[in-house]
């Protein structure tokens, strides 16, 4: 009997480690606030979102002109959610609230901490810590390469926002438990380990987990289909719950809420605004194109956050913006290796035509990154849009970028 025969004679491991309660929860369907949002919720199979969600504050520290609080809450299924609430120190009166949505990045061992300057002593607690798996501190290169070295949520708080950054479904504290590995995932990991050995690489625990999670995402997508939901729909569930928490936090003006995200986080922002009227303004960075432009060469550049079954029946990807009354800034990177330039320009023109009063587009000569200059523009856009006096938002794109 071979080693493979021995392994396969053992009980088959769960393919939903830590989420064995997901099937029962997914049977509850979300009720949206409008017909358009309900149509989207039904297409994505968004599970019912618990309102007035209780949360726990585990610690709070003042540093660098901000107060960072470590929060957690328990959703109706899966592991506990870990989050960070960052707000300016010494402020009085309600502040505009922003939900900062972390990117995919091919890194699921870590979630929202890629957006937060976490003070020493706050990186561990017993309420759903992202580092509970023993992965250690966030690799320095993640925020450096993708976010220009800025801790986005912390920096946004320094600009005057109350910012909540949370781990969403499949990431950080909300990741799947992949020990033991499901069999199909194990086969993919064995191949990666062979490549590491050949190259003389000793992977970290986080790198090993990320390799497993990348292969496992296919399994999660299949499970979601069986349950009548989707990866994007379940992520949207977590994001809607977090938005409810943000609206309830002390010092946050629930009438002035926005969100922003880069890459997969930008897609999450687009989806969240389409689902919730609480979002008054949002920013999508490096996550806008047409579906047609992804065929045939760019299909494998993206995760299941973009490829949701049935979504194309509701229109094109930029059409999601028409399902919201919020103002939107879309930032395009002309050297983005994940999107063809023509697809981005077609999406831009479509949005100009469909949302002339609520859409702003800017073009940047950058690869797939969220640079400090792009962040400056995003913060200025949200600052103008979330003023308490409800001023008119300029929708004229910057000619220096849009005509490039």
Image (cartoon, grey):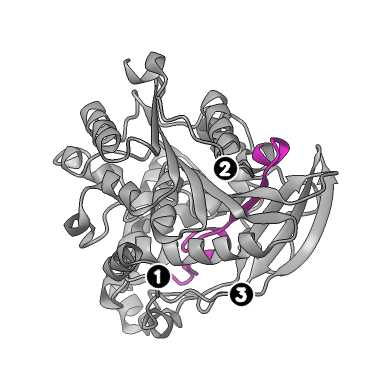
Name the quarter where the N terminus is drawn.
Answer: bottom left
Q: Nearer the viewer, mark 3 or mark 2?
A: 2
Depth check: give the residue in front, 241 or 324.
324
On screen, residue 279 versus residue 65, left or right, reads: left
Q: How many marks?
A: 3
Say whether residue 77 is visible.
yes
What residue is pinned by disc 2? 390
**Residue 161 spot, x, y in % from top left:** 67, 43
Is 159 a magenta residue? yes
Residue range in magenta is 156-181
> For mark 1, does the 10 Å Cα neighbourhood hold few (<14), some (14 to 19), or many (20 or more) residues?
some
Query: Residue 83: where, in percent of width, then height?
Result: 64, 59
Q: Left or right: where does residue 125 sit relative to residue 278?
A: right
Q: Position of residue 146 (x, y in %)?
A: 50, 34
Residue 98, position as x, y percentages in the image: 59, 48
Q: Which residue occupies 38% across, 55% down?
A: 274
The residue drawn where x is 46% and y is 29% is 394
- Spatial CA distance of label 1 from label 3 is 16 Å
Give me the residue at 81% from left, 38% from top.
65
Residue placed under numbered mark 3 in the picture: 52
**For residue 181, which quarter of the picture?**
bottom left
Q: Are marks 3 and 2 in contact (CB under 8 Å)?
A: no
C-alpha distance separating marks 3 and 2 = 27 Å
């Amino acid at each position: 009997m071979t080693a493979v025969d021995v392994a396969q004679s053992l009980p088959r491991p769960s393919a939903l480690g830590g989420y064995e309660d997901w099937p029962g929860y997914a049977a509850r369907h979300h009720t949206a606030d409008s017909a358009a949002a309900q149509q989207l919720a039904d297409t994505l199979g968004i599970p019912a979102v618990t309102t007035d969600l209780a949360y726990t504050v585990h610690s709070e520290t003042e540093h660098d002109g901000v107060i960072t609080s470590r929060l957690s809450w328990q959703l109706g299924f899966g592991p506990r959610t870990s989050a960070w609430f960052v707000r300016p120190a010494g402020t009085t009166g309600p502040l505009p609230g922003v939900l900062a949505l972390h990117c995919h990045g091919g890194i699921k061992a870590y979630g929202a901490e890629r957006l937060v300057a976490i003070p020493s002593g706050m990186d561990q607690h017993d309420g759903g810590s992202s580092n509970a798996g023993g992965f250690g501190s966030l690799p320095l290169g993640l925020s450096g390469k993708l976010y220009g070295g800025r801790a986005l949520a912390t920096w946004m708080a320094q600009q005057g926002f109350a910012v909540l950054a949370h781990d969403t479904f499949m990431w950080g504290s909300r990741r799947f438990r992949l020990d033991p590995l499901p069999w199909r995932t194990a086969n993919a990991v064995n191949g990666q380990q062979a490549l590491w050995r050949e190259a003389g690489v000793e992977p970290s625990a986080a790198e090993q987990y990320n390799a497993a999670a990348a292969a496992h995402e296919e399994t999660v997508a299949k499970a979601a289909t069986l349950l009548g939901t989707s990866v994007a729909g379940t992520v949207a569930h977590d994001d809607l719950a977090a938005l409810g928490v943000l609206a309830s936090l002390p010092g946050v003006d629930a009438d002035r809420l926005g969100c922003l995200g880069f890459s997969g986080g930008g897609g999450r922002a687009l989806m969240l605004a389409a689902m919730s009227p609480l979002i008054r303004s949002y920013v999508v960075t490096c996550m806008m194109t047409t579906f047609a432009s992804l065929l045939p060469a760019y299909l494998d550049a993206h995760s299941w956050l973009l490829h949701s079954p049935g979504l194309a029946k509701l229109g094109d990807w930029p059409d999601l913006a028409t399902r919201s009354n919020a103002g939107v800034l879309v930032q395009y990177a002309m050297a983005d290796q994940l999107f063809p330039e023509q697809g981005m320009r077609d999406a831009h023109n479509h949005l100009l035509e469909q949302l002339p009063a609520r859409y702003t587009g800017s073009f940047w000569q950058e690869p797939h990154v969220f640079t400090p200059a792009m962040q400056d523009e995003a913060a200025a856009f949200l600052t103008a849009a979330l003023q308490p006096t409800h001023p008119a938002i300029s929708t004229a794109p910057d000619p220096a970028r849009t005509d490039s």
